[in-house]
Amino acid sequence: MSEESMEKKAYGITSNKDLNLKATELRLGLPGSESPERVAVNKNLVAGAKRGFSDTVKELPKQPQVSVNSNGQTSVPAPKQQVVGWPPIRSFRKNTMAVSHTKNEENGDPKMGSGCLYVKVSMDGAPYLRKVDLEIYSCYLDLSSALEKMFSCFTIGQYGSHGVPTRDGLSESRLMDLPDGSEYILTYEDKDGDWMLVGDVPWDMFIGSCKRMGIMKSSDAIGLAPRAMEKCRKRT
Amino acid sequence: MPTMDPNRKKSKPVDLVDSVDSRVELTESTRSCPFPDEVLERVLSLIDSHKDRSSVSLVCKDWYNAERWSRRHVFIGNCYSVSPEIVAARFPRIRSVTLKGKPRFSDFNLVPEDWGADVHPWLSVFSSAYPFLEELRLKRMAVSDESLEFLATSFHGFKALSLLSCDGFSTDGLKAIASHCKNLTELDIQENGIDDLGGHWLSCFPESQTSLEVLNFASLNSEVSFDALEKLVSRCKSLRVLKLNRNISLDQLQKLLLHCPQLMELGTGTFMQELISGPVTEFKNMFSNCRKLVTVSGLWDATPLYLPVIYPVCASLTFLNLSYATLQSSELANLLFHCRSLRRLWLLDTVGDKGLEAVGSCCPLLEELRVFPADPFDQEIFLGVTESGFVSVSRGCPKLRHVLYFCRQMTNAAVATIARNCPDFTHFRLCIMNPGQPDYLTKEPMDEAFGAIVKTCTKLQRLAVSGLLTDRTFEYIGQHAKNMETLSVAFAGNSDLGMECVLKGCPKLRKLEIRDCPFGNAALLSGLTKYESMRSLWMSACNVTMNACRMLAKEKPRLNVEVMRDEEGSDDSQAHKVYVYRSVAGPRRDAPPFVLTL
């Protein structure tokens, strides 16, 4: 399904007459997309709003995070664009928080005692990311069970009542066992930018080098460390 | 344009102050009035509120004169509404001036640089009219180093300078103030667009400077000389407000506190140390002598390890500003447990709904809450606070009057509950960060939420709305918000009707700021008779055309109608940014090329 028709479905738009053409159509730009299109942020625009809105909206290239469930309806809040001067926060606060934020994200050393070590966790097919504080967990088991709870709402929709998430103590990185044999794998991006399998290194080393995490379908985990692929093959 | 000569019969003074009807005439006083002017002046000098003073000045000519001679402080809400010459002519004995410049949306980068609001013309006039000027408080003004130097050298008794959200100056300007203002009692530098060239300015305070009562440099990034700071703090025995910047470490703070036990308001520096060896016990008694402390802010990088250091003073705190401390819910709960007297609390949304539950349980006297987003531009995460946190606070804090709340989801039902729990709101600003977002449960617009607020909270003076809103919201506002003075609107409404309802229905409206709404010419012109009773109107990225603005300007010569040109300039018939305000000074002469005065 093309992006365009997915969005149209989301807003119950069946024909182009409903909107003021391209000027008000919501778009998700892929990385590398060219000149900014005019984008409407308010669906209730009266047709003919023309330029009023476009000059305040700057489109950022983003990976589309839209998911489609079994009914073919998107279940996603309106795609967000960055808008000049919104949310209304003064520059001083913006600049200060940006500094703190980078400090926290760069700072993988638990000894700092800064109290939190937030990393983003994305899941294939989930409409938005979560952030977890690695500081509050003491081992991989805790982390993966927390993630399972956090993301269960996204997988339950897909396999309904049959799927009972099981966990094999031997392989903490395997999260869920779906009836169709596919499974999810917990991966992380380390300080060098490489995507690794969670569970390979001692816990302390992990939280020291983990920048962000991803929950991928095992079928998508091609190109990861060979161990990951080996584990997948064992299960089938 | 009427002159300000009070000796003319039937002259019509247009008041400097916002809330007064400009069409009242003065009457001749009766000669049998037994009250000598000096006595009347003495009595009137006790009146502080500028609104009351405006009323006083309208009673009769004698009272007008007595008031103008006895006034010591003048508040000018829009620097272009009046000229410095007019002010100086009417009020001969001013000692203190508060001056505000740019429209508020300039804080969010909606106003280009060099727009105006230069303080220098004011200082020039004041240097001859008010050589004994003592206080200057500026907000959103353009201030240069030359102006600061001029200020420092022209007013020999100058005492207090406060700069909030100003820009155009550097720390060199502060050097001039520190060096030359011998009687300085207050230097309050907050959130300005300042060019920080280093912390040497602090070392410019001479040894003879012992009168400082307020020193706030929390928003400056450079390091100051700790030695100079410590000496300054030790010799200023009347210091009651000290707000440090992030470079000041915990052990430096400890040393400073030894010198100023009389402190009432403290902004700490960074609230953690990197060395873990023997820290907390050392700092445990840091605050034990600060018996007068009622406000604490700063707390940069505060961690659970160090926060307990402030517990000893928490019981008497009335204002706690944690909006730069990334606390989690449990840290906040532990802290608030000790802070039962809080009236004002500012937080970051890292505390989450659980943290707000703690607010509700621990702070029954709370009157003001502000929750700022830690990650406002990260649209991928789903953290922060929700409607549930706000509801928890409203349950435990029925005295809430002033709220600023940034969140990513809200429901109509929650806001209705909040309004019921806290009917005394005077300032209600809700920012649902995704523009045009509906009630996340029902998917309906957020009209009923704001409807509930305006219906229940009859004392509401200030309102900022957000989320998906139809004209219905504005109908409610027009029908019920009878005390509302300021309204901020963004990404809302369906048609002109929305704005028309507000202009027609809100008698006390003074400031209306609108961005990215489908309000057009009919809406703009429906306020034709209203704008002179208001301070200002801002409309940007709406549907207003140049012709409509010209029409407004033509019909209402006492209004300044300014249109800011877009840089791309492709569509000249649309008015992209419109700023309308009343003025007795006529069109401004310092408008930059991109500002058209119609």
Image (cartoon, rainbow, N blue to C red):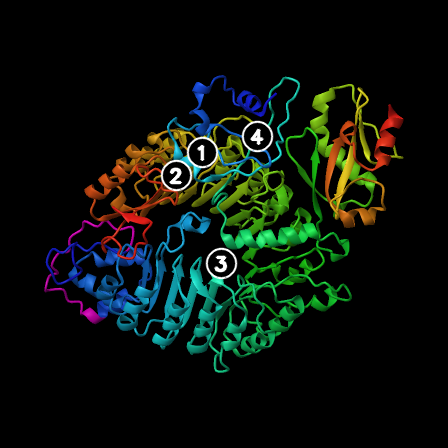
The residue pinned by badge 4 equals A77
The residue pinned by badge 1 equals B452
Specify whether residue B32 is painted magenta. Answer: yes
Please identify the quadrant where the N terminus of chain B is shown.
Answer: bottom left
Which of the two residues, B66 or B181, is positioned nearer the viewer here? Answer: B181
The residue pinned by badge 3 equals B191
Q: CA distance from mark 1 to mark 3?
A: 34 Å
Indicate the position of residue B319 as horizontal and vertical percent values.
Answer: 54, 57
Q: Is residue B199 above or below residue B109?
A: below
Alpha-carbon neighbours of circle 1 within 10 Å: few (<14), some, or many (≥20)?
A: many
Q: CA distance from mark 4 to mark 2?
A: 24 Å
- Give the magenta range: B17-38
Dots 3 and 2 on the same chain: yes
SS class, disc 4: loop
Q: Which chain does tag 2 point to? A: B
Indicate the position of residue A26 as horizontal and vertical percent values.
Answer: 51, 29
Q: How many marks?
A: 4
Q: Which chain does tag 3 point to? A: B
SS class, disc 1: helix
Q: Which mark is residue B541?
A: 2
Q: For the stretch drawn in magenta, what is the main secondary structure?
A: loop
Q: Could you tell which of marks 1 and 3 lies nearer the N-terminus?
A: 3
Which of the two residues, B569 or B362, is positioned nearer the viewer here? Answer: B569
Q: Which chain does tag 4 point to? A: A
